[in-house]
Amino acid sequence: MARRPIAEELESAADRIADISRADLQIILRRAALMLRNVAGVPLEPVTADALDSIAAEMAVGRSDLIQIILREWLETNAYLPVPTIDEESETDGNA
């Protein structure tokens, strides 16, 4: 499970703490603990971290989301991942 749904689940549980069952709360907390235990950070040079933070703020996304976008695009550009295709019949609303 991704971090965002876990965070949303934790926030929701906090909002309804009186109504949530002990078993449900235990499951949510165990998932959160597992996510925290498996977090592996990538050390970045300060100049790189600053650049990423600046771009992430400009794009209104989190740093990890930005890193995922950059990595996916790099993998697609270098043919390590297939490039998603757009069906010629689909509407793009002017965005190709």
Image (tube, grey):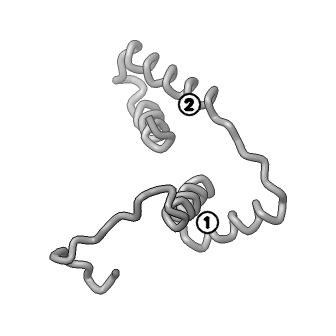
Q: Residue at x 54, y 59 (%)?
A: 75
Q: Nearer the viewer, residue 85 or 48?
A: 85
* Residue on which disc 2 sits: 35
Image-based side of 6 in relation to 40, left or right: left
Q: Which structural element holds mark 2? A: helix
Q: Position of residue 71 (x, y in %)?
A: 57, 58
Question: Measured along the vertical axis of the image, is residue 81 above or below residue 28?
Answer: below
Residue type for callout 1:
Ala
Q: Position of residue 56 (x, y in %)?
A: 61, 66
Q: Which structural element holds mark 1? A: helix
Q: Position of residue 43 (x, y in %)?
A: 78, 47
Q: Which mark is residue 56?
A: 1
Q: Which mark is residue 41?
A: none
Residue type for callout 2:
Met
Label 1 vs label 2: CA separation? 23 Å
Q: Position of residue 55 (x, y in %)?
A: 64, 70
Q: Residue at x 15, y 76 (%)?
A: 89
Quadrant housing the C terminus? bottom left
Image-based side of 1 in relation to 57, left or right: left
Residue extending farthest to the front is 79
